[in-house]
Structure formats: structure tokens, C-alpha cells
Image (tube, rainbow, N blue to C red):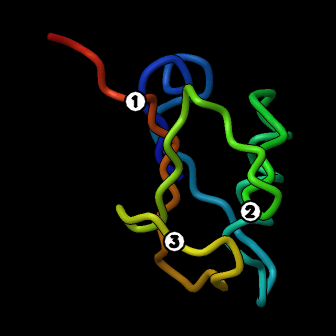
Amino acid sequence: MRFVGFLARKIGSELVIEVKDGTTFSEAVFEISRKYGFGPIDLERGSHPDYLIVPLNGRSQHPNVKLKEGDEISFLPPVAGG
């Protein structure tokens, strides 16, 4: 897991977690967001806050993708500026 912005200040910039075999991207995001108090985020139901982008391995992925060793989920606030 990689956190940026306000979440990095709250949780830390990186976190390694173990998940059960067969855990999906959506299940992992739901549990992490609930556990650390910025969710729950339910990607399967489209419950996704406007203040976060949640890619898997740097790309948008289907919520039902099964995670494998070495996958990285990031919780990123959108970039703004001018």
C-alpha cells in the first residue's frame, strides 16, 4: 500500500499487508479504507470518494481483479494546481 498527501501524514507513506489467497482489489481497498478510517470505499458498488484515486500497480483496474504477491494499491489525492 502506498499513501500520499493527508493519508501519508495520518498513516505513513507505505504499508505492507498480507491478504488471503483469492482476495480481490475491491475487498482489499474496502478493508484498508475501513481499518484506517477513511472509508469504507466499495469499488464494486461505485462508492468511491472524489478526494481519492485508487490505482492498482499504477493503473485503473477492474474491482474483481485478484491480488497477487507484489501488487501495489495506492491511495492518491487528485492533483490540483494552476
The residue mark sitting in front, 3 or 2, is 3
Amino acid type, callout 2: Ala
Cβ atoms at labels 1 and 2 below 8 Å apart: no
| Spot occupied by residue 43 in the image (x, y as percentages of width and height) | 73, 57
Q: Is residue 14 above or below residue 27?
A: above
Q: Quadrant of the C terminus?
A: top left
Cβ atoms at labels 3 and 2 below 8 Å apart: no
Q: Earlier in the sequence, mark 3 or mark 2?
A: 2
| Spot occupied by residue 60 in the image (x, y as percentages of width and height) | 45, 64
The outermost residue toward the left is: 82
Residue in the image at 80% along x and 35% along y: 39
Q: Which residue is mark 1?
A: 78
Quarter of the figure with residue 22: bottom right
Badge 1, how many Cα within 10 Å: few under 14, some, many 20+?
few
Residue in the image at 38% along x and 65% along y: 59
Instruction: Indicate the secondary structure of the residue bearing disc 3.
Output: loop
Q: Which residue is mark 2?
A: 28
Query: Marks 3 and 1, how far apart in space?
Result: 17 Å
Q: Is residue 61 above or below residue 40?
A: below
Instruction: Indicate the secondary structure of the residue bearing disc 2.
Output: helix
| Spot occupied by residue 6 in the image (x, y as percentages of width and height) | 51, 17
Q: Is residue 75 above or below residue 80?
A: below
Q: Earlier in the sequence, mark 1 or mark 2?
A: 2
